[in-house]
Amino acid sequence: MIKLNNIVATYTTTRGQVNAVDGVSLEIPKGIILGIAGESGCGKSTLMKVIYGDIGYPLALSSGGVDYGFTDAKGRPVTSATIREQWFRRISYIPQSSMSSMNPVVRIREQFVDFQGSGLNKAKVLDEVRAYVKQLDLPPEVIDAYPHQLSGGMRQRVMVAMATFFQPELILADEPTTALDVVVQKGILLLLMELQERMKNTIIFVSHDMGVHYQITHKMLIMYAAKAVEYGDSEAIFRAPLHPYTRMLIRSLPTIGDTQTREGVAGRPPSLWENLQGCRFAARCPLATELCRTREPAFVEHRPGQFAACHYAGEQPATSEQPVASEAAV
Amino acid sequence: MTTIIKAEGLHKRYRLGSLLRKVSINALDNVNLAVESDEPVIVSVVGESGSGKTTLAKVILRLVDPSAGRAVVYDTVVAGEGKKADPAAFLRTVQPIFQNPFEAFSNYRTVDSYLSDTARRVSRLEGAEATQAIDEALAAVGLKYQDVKGKYPNQFSGGELQRVSIARALIPRPSIIIADEPVSMIDASLRMNIVNLFLRLKQEYRTSFLYITHDLATAYYISDYIAVMYRGSIVEFGRARQVLARPQHPYTQLLLDSIPSTTQKWERRSFVASDIETKEFQLTGCKFANRCPLAQEICSQQRPEPRRQEDGRDVYCHFV
């Protein structure tokens, strides 16, 4: 079990301080794929940085921390303070842009050996790398190439290979397929699912594409304006979302074969610089009442295993047949 | 009937590499399509990166010259052999919207200066007339002049700024707007607001759209016609709903099969996508032959001719 305890992550800027993640608590069971969804600026990437332990100016962890549920070599539980020591071996990261994450002037095999640390038998490690790369259906020559010689999809497969080579307990993937074409994306997602089933590790996967979440995740976290608004089994969330925002996210997408009118979510998220009161989604919510605008809803379990932060969780909007959004408000 | 948009044997060849080792890429390789109608239409061009869809848009927008062939928009030749060279008249007929509104507007200029420039230079309007045209265009996208006056691009969200760029394109009341991936930079939750706006403009302003996208779901949602492109060639072209509901070309089928839908889970077989892009651009036969489950010998030797189907669509495959 990975525990996020009331995480508050703060950016310091010339304008002052702003909380990009504002009090997120979560218990993530081991051996699942957790999806995190939300609009740009909702804090999903910042939360990933906190979990990865990639914290440094201007980002700071102002409160809370992560219990990773595993111990280090000396038997001490790993927490936010010590997670950096576990990079690549116990926790790894697949970024969105593989091109800017690899060294363009160093062959891929050198980059593979690089994080091994010095003093190890390079030739032996390289043999293992070759064998592993082959398992992932990659041609073994790819590790002799420079990053720019590979296509985007191939590079992203190499990133997946690097991130999974040590079979880490926890893999973080921040929009790893957003820049790729759908056909290539499907190949990489299927590969990730297969590796996760084989290694039984935990993957936390950020994407803004609800279709991707439906295809690969076991559980989902929906974030809105630095807060967690819904968390639960993906099946349940897609079948019966509790939070109106989740419902609108799922409904806003057209599907092929379905000609009914779709509306986006009207309005935009509140600025985190403002003094926010009540539910942060209230201004865009079709269900919002005076209660929502004045009192912040608690993030509680409404159905077994399904959490939401909404005073009216699970209630259908009265105007469910009517388009709820007005176009002019983007 | 008006020829809304037509491509006749369009070719565009880019040369890459050094002096000694030249490689040429056929970004457009004999592209033919024609849409005739008396009503405004939305034509989608879909495909992966490297399919040539953006090059097609650039040729129609006169941003690049085709190597051969020609393009017709609203009965006027706009590119290639016999094009009419009148930039102002062209811009009154054809207007662009680009992918990233933050790159389309300079950070050092107010966005309303772009609107008044378009009103003055393209529509030849001055003073009160110009202001009125700008007001109308902004109202059509759900904005007011006060909302944009004196503001710089960084004071808008992506969705709002894309609305401003649509308003700018509307000022000359163009017959057709070429929109190159207009919603791919916009959050999924706001995307449909822009897409619905296109539908409304088609009805109220009678504007046609050439909608270039890799998102098949929104293409299905708004378009009347759809062209599926692969490595510089069209593989299937026809009525959007028919093509996407019952794809005939194996590539269209693969594309549809790869969309992560929220209703049906993928079948779990792993496959490796092609990694021989540059070679595929140069193939003489069907460019999809290397990846196609149906491929026979003829596919790698002979470029398939379009086969007209009963429902009027063209499918470029030897085995439909």
Image: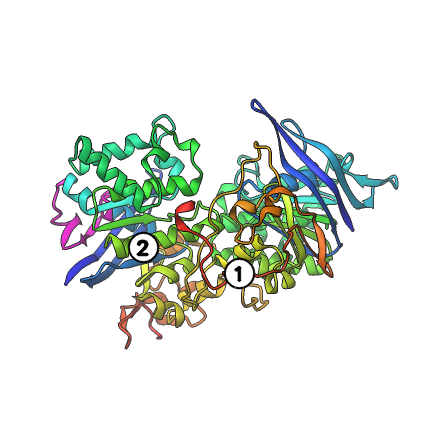
Question: In the image, is residue B282 part of the stretch drawn in magenta?
Answer: no
What type is the residue that disc 2 sits on?
Arg
Dot in front, 2 or 1: 1
Of residues B177 and B309, the one nearer the viewer is B177
Q: Mark 2, residues whose alpha carbon is within 10 Å: few (<14), some, or many (≥20)?
A: some
Q: Please, what secondary structure does the residue beneath circle 1 have?
A: loop
Q: Is residue B180 left or right of residue A288?
A: left
Q: Report the residue at 56% width, 57% height from top.
A: A247
Q: Report the residue at 59% width, 62% height from top.
A: A238
Q: Is residue A282 visible?
A: yes
- Residue B196 spot, x, y in % from top left: 37, 54
Question: In the image, is residue B84 part of the stretch drawn in magenta?
Answer: yes
Q: Report the residue at 51% width, 47% height from top.
A: A284
Q: Is residue A115 left or right of residue A257?
A: right
Q: Is residue A191 left or right of residue A182?
A: right
What type is the residue that disc 1 sits on?
Ala
- Residue B199 spot, x, y in % from top left: 32, 56
Whole-Å distance between the Cαs marked 2 and 1?
Answer: 26 Å
Instruction: Quickly name the residue at label 2.
Output: B200
Q: Mark 1, residues whose alpha carbon is within 10 Å: few (<14), some, or many (≥20)?
A: few
Classify A142 as above or below A120: below
Q: Is residue A136 visible?
A: no
Instruction: Quickly name the residue at label 1.
Output: A318
Span shown in magenta: B60-86
Q: Quadrant of the C terminus of chain B?
A: bottom left
The image quarter containing residue B62 is top left
Of residues A190 and A220, the one nearer the viewer is A220
The image quarter containing residue A219 is bottom right
Taking the view exactly as shown, the residue that stands out farthest to the front is: A290
